[in-house]
Image (spheres, grey):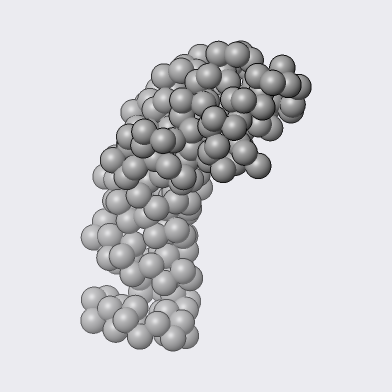
Amino acid sequence: MACGNGKNDLVMWLLEKYDMKFDMKLAILETFKASLKKERSNGKLSENSSFELLNWMLKECGNHILDIKISVLLACKQGKIGHVKWLFDKFSETCRDINPSEALEAACHGFDTFAIYLFLVKRFRNRKFDLQTIMQYACEFGNDQIVEDLLKRFDKNKLNVREGIFAACLKAHLNVLRVLWLYAKPKYFREKHLVNLVSNSENSEMVKWLMATVDR
């Protein structure tokens, strides 16, 4: 509980008093989760964050106690670029083994994750990505910046744009549909199934946009 609530002084006192006789892997994971809540939007950690405690615990117990994969995925989902960079800097060798598609998919889940997406694409530039799945997640979760960069950066034939359009429609992400309209083939928007899907969505704004934009 102390780790999860970022009670640094209490955690350090307990660990020193009882000579680390706790489940340290669980303790440091909870500490990491607590630190995610305290990062500022500019990617810098607040002075009172649990980041100092993380470094202290790693120094006392060894880097092996932190599950790097879980930590990276958590930081990506929550849009914490400061944590993502810290993990890749501190555990560069271990991070090489992370599945880049999994990390990018996690970034697509969250909000304010475009900086993380760009960081991962650059970091894993020599690796292969599951582009169709990443595209699907970005459309489904309304990450229009990621969708636009995918369309600009990669071969559209590898992205399965059609499924992305349907995913955006199902979740009523008009922001994503507008981006897809700029880059995708118009024929995808004219499919009867898609028109029926939008018409039955009860999303008046999306219906109006489709009717006004798509020349059927």
Q: Is residue 48 visible?
A: yes
Quarter of the image for the C terminus: give it.
Answer: bottom left
Residue 73 seen in render: no
For residue 122, what is the image quadrant? Answer: top left
Query: Between residues 89 and 114, which one lies in front from this camera angle?
Result: 89
Q: Residue at x 33, y 69 (%)?
A: 174
Q: Quadrant of residue 26?
A: top right
Relative to 110, residue 169 above or below:
below
Name the spot of residue 22 as percent of width and height, x first: 74, 26
Q: Residue at x 46, y 45 (%)?
A: 37
Residue 1 % position (x, y): 65, 42
Q: Nearer the viewer, residue 118 or 90?
A: 90
Is 209 situated left or right of 107 in this image? left
Q: Is residue 79 above or below residue 55?
A: below
Location of residue 18 in the rendering, given as x and y in whole percent from the top left corner: 73, 21
Q: Depth check: give the residue in front, 201 or 78.
A: 78
Residue 94's spot in the image, x, y percent? 54, 18
Q: Does 44 sit above or below residue 132?
A: above
What residue appears at the point 35 percent right and 85 percent down from the top-left corner? 204
Q: Is residue 62 left or right of residue 115?
A: right
State the residue at coordinates (59%, 32%). 10
Numbered label tally: 0
Question: Picture quarter containing residue 155?
Answer: top left
